[in-house]
Image (spheres, helix red, strand yellow):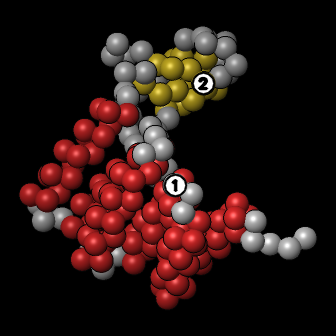
Amino acid sequence: MAGQWAVHSLTDASVEGNSGIPDIGENGGVGYHYGKTADGRPAAVCPRQVDQASIKLQVKESLVLAGELNDTREQAKCLAQLCRMHLLSRQYKEAIEFAEEAQVVFQKSQDKCGEGVTLLNKASAHMGLGEIDVALQVAEDALAMFLQEEDKRQEATAHHFLYEIHTQAGNYEA
């Protein structure tokens, strides 16, 4: 039902002070809005009526519009978002397909950082499928891109992800 909010606090009280349109965050989830519970405590809220299927539809519509505008960077971002959404729902093969499409479009728009992040998402999907060796290679490719671009923040993210892959694979000595 429009206008209803899911409250994420200690109680399921009504929330005041919420407005705005839900958005999709960088991690693929619905953006939270902040308000207060009836007793004045802060609470994070998100609209109940927004489900993954409707968000996917909105992202696909954005993808079509970006194509009509010949905006390759926005197309790549939409494809990367669809990849993350499929990761969240554990649809790993579909996530890989969207990651590969996004990678090609990020290359066209010469966005190395976007391409590298997409590679990390692709590596995550391979991890989900149990394809550790492939995940390791893809994550190493992402790290190489971040090193080339001298992007220290993403470089750190890639190193952490590589650690996670090695840990899951048992590739370490005590």
Residue at coordinates 17% horizontally, 57% vertically from top-left? 66
Identify the amino acid type marked 1: Leu
Is label 1 in a helix, a strand or a loop?
Answer: loop
Q: Residues within 10 Å of mark 1 (few under 14, many from 20)?
A: some
Q: Label for residue 8?
A: 2
Q: What's the mark number on residue 129?
A: 1
Decide: is 174 above or below 63.
Answer: below
Q: Is 47 displayed left or right of 73 in the figure?
A: right
Residue 65 horizontal side relative to residue 94, left or right: left
**In the structure shown, which secondary structural element does the residue marked by tag 2 occupy?**
strand
> Is 12 left, or right, of 80 in this rendering?
right
Q: Is residue 10 visible?
A: yes
Residue that lies at the very extreme toward the right in this rendered image: 174
Q: On the rendered image, what quadrant is the N terminus found in?
A: top left
Q: Where does the image place residue 154, in percent across and percent down from the top left?
A: 56, 72
Local packing at callout 2 (Cα closer than 10 Å; few below 14, some 14-19, many 20+) is: some
**Which of the two residues, 115 or 170, is positioned nearer the viewer here?**
170
- The amino acid type found where label 2 is placed reads His
Task: From the viewer's perspective, tell me whether residue 13 is left or right of residue 75.
Answer: right
* Image marks 2 and 1: residues in contact by CB distance under 8 Å: no
Determine the residue positioned at 51% across, 20% down: 6
Which percent across, then down, holds residue 95? 39, 54
Name the quarter where the C terminus is drawn.
bottom right
